[in-house]
Amino acid sequence: MPGITIAQADAPFILAIDVGTSSVRALLYDASCRIIEPETYFGRAQVALQTDSTGMAVFEPSAVPSAVVDVVDTILAKLQGKISQIHAVAIDTFVSSMIGLDKNLAPITSLYTYADTRCSSDAQELRRSYNIEEIHERTGCMIHSSYLPARLHWEKRTNPSRFNSVHHWWSLGSVLSQQFLGCPDVSLSTASWTGLLDRKKLEWDQVWIRQLGLAQGQLPKIADFGPGTSSLKPEWCKRWPSLAKAVWFLAIGDGAAANIGSGCTNDHHVALTIGTTAAMRIVPSTIPEKIPSGLWNYRVDSKRPLVGGALTEGGNVHEWLLKNLKLPEPAECEKLLSQMKPAKHGLSMLPFFAGERAPGWRDDASATLHGIRLNTRPIDIFHAGLEAVALRLGQIYRRLSPLAHPDHKILASGGFLNSPAWAQIIANVLGKPIIACLEPEATSRGIAWLALESLGKLDLAKSQTPELGITFEPDPNAHQDYQEALLAQEKLYKKLLG
């Protein structure tokens, strides 16, 4: 992992805390947003998501805040005597989290995550009961189990006494702000991911608040990312002297941070990320008056909208197919894939192994494979699965590209780059070159950049693009073949899901 030494680093120093659903990590950046000896000066703590067959995906209330404390303890212990003061602390978290607290701020519920699908039927009920297009335009979000309207509806329906006893519905970011600063404000970025924000007024959506039976004051105050605050609570000042004067910034969404950190800070760059799931996002030059169908409009901060779409499918499809089909070794699979012609296997797949998010937002969708014949081989099914994910990204890109500058570039990151054959398929589907972004810490780098900008130390508009790798150039003939495959996938989707 690249970085600079402490001797090479210039103040101010930024402590970046990246809170994910599998681990919490802390890294240090300098005044030029260069990461400082990440192999030495880091903190990491695993967190265990509690899941079961009902669709539950929650954390025990104190698990993640305790992990944040652990990683800060760890990195500060390693830095003791090396740096006397850290000037700012910036945090990103997984978003669409929710926890219910009593009047004394004690937890009443678990910390729900976006992955908890127990409210899927509630999302379907809300979709039937309300005007989806109107809600989409007002909040920037569709109705789906990953957003809070469906989760709050489920909570009220399944446990009304508990729902009525909750005094505060907070995000994880508010929990952390309260713990360290004594202030539960939520960032505009995090609020935009809830499905409860009026995207034009930048305040809580009063229509949803009334319809869900929420009281004024149950949701935290919304504030911008900056200018930050130096009001670390006394007990933490005592524990962490090097942070006593640090400026703390409100936690923002991890997706927004990743966009900034990967160099996709304006409409000249579209971010493509494929890990377990996949997403395409852009920071457009203006807030779109009308959001493209099926996409969302979140925020990085008050100055920057974020528009895009996230899939439930991505590397999870690749992993499932490798695990369940009797395929050759990965290297041999890569060789076979590189020799196969686009969409000539006669198969069409809906890769919804975990339901659907963008662009259709159907929790009830499941994976479907159509066109199997006696001569269909496992490698054909594998090829069709990877193409299917690429075609879903094609649906996102078709809606997203009008918001981009005509000469925009697509910067790609994630584990899928380990499969050049799959990356080439995606470039062929999009009909646009995709450029590998080699920044290993895009998310933490993004929050460090934003902190330095707020401190007046860096101009984000002039931020350097991270190191780039190979460019996958599209084949025009393959792109044309994939347009036909896209029509076949759309036909299958409409036949099964309407």
Image: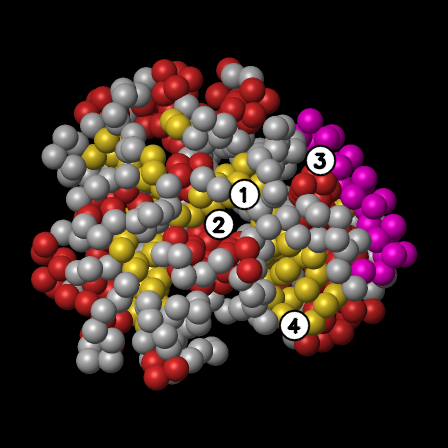
User: In the rendering, at what x and y percent does residue 148 appear?
Assistant: 40, 32
Say whether marks 3 and 2 touch (CB < 8 Å): no
Q: Amino acid at mark 3?
A: Tyr
Q: Secondary structure at mark 1?
A: strand
Q: Position of residue 94 (x, y in %)?
A: 40, 49
Q: Is residue 494 left or right of residue 152?
A: right
Which of disc 2 and disc 3 is earlier in sequence? 2
Q: Which mark is residue 469?
A: 4
Is 196 located above or below residue 134 in the figure?
below
Residue 97 visible here: no
Q: Nearer the viewer, residue 233 or 191?
A: 233
Indicate the quadrant containing the C terminus: top left, top right, bottom left or bottom right.
top right
Label 1: few (<14), some or many (≥20) within 10 Å?
Answer: many
Image height of 362 relative to 256, above or below: above
Q: Secondary structure at mark 2?
A: helix
Disc 3: which residue: 493
Nearer the observer: mark 4 or 3; the answer is 4
